[in-house]
Amino acid sequence: MDELSKLIQDIKEDKNKFSLLLNRMKPLINKYVYILYKDEKEDIYSELCCALWEAVCKISFYKKDGEIMSFLINALQNKFHELYRISRKNHDFNTPLFDIDDCKIASPEHNYDNILLNEDIRNFLSHFSGKRKRIFYYILIHNLSDSEIAKKLHLSRQYVNRIRKSLRTEFYDYFNL
């Protein structure tokens, strides 16, 4: 019997030996925790440890170390993908550039301060052309999400997100913020 299969058998008999397997799988778990940086690290770590424990409890055939390791890695990977989908849904990569209440565009019902802000934003947009200008316009004037802009301009959401990030720095530089 191989080392890992013996360890699995020992864990099934004595649950306290799970820490030995946990230490062995720690680099992979830490890698997944690091990738999901937007969420609480302790929560992610606990979720992945639970997934490892469930995998050990479910494993029925444990003769070869390679098969066992593959099963455990797949269990952790599946849990990671589940957590990633949840994280993505929660964070959605559509972080606002700034608080929309601070940047309402001038209209008849707004006061004159907003007219000046509107003019400043239009002057800022005049420094750009092409796709960047249209993306900036939809972000600043219409406050659209990356997905909405991507659909409207037939671009990828990732490209729009990259432009949004560059907008943030250019916006702060232009207005000396």
Image: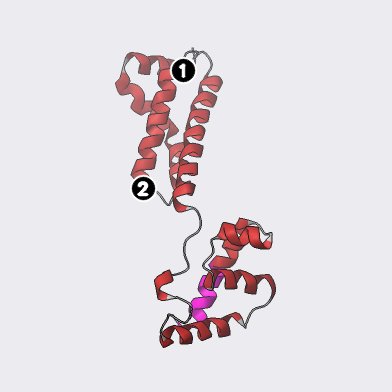
Q: Residues within 10 Å of mark 2 (few under 14, many from 20)?
A: few
- Side (left or right) of 122 relative to 52: right
- Asked if residue 36 can be seen in this view, the reply is no
Residue identifier under label 2 = 40
Give the main secondary structure of the magenta stretch: helix
Question: How far across and how far down the image is residue 121, in percent?
Answer: 53, 81
* Magenta region, residue range: 165-176
The image shows residue 2, relative to residue 117, as above or below, that is above
- Mark 2 or mark 1: whose residue is earlier in sequence: 2
Residue at the image position 43 percent from the left and 15 percent from the top: 6
Magenta stretch: includes residue 55: no
Magenta stretch: includes residue 166: yes
- Asked if residue 65 can be seen in this view, the reply is yes
Residue identifier under label 1 = 59
User: Amino acid type of disc 1?
Assistant: Ile
Name the outermost residue toward the front.
Answer: 108
The image shows residue 24, relative to residue 177, as above or below, that is above
At mark 2, the secondary structure is: loop
Question: How far across and how far down the image is residue 147, in percent?
Answer: 58, 57
Q: Residues within 10 Å of mark 1 (few under 14, many from 20)?
A: few
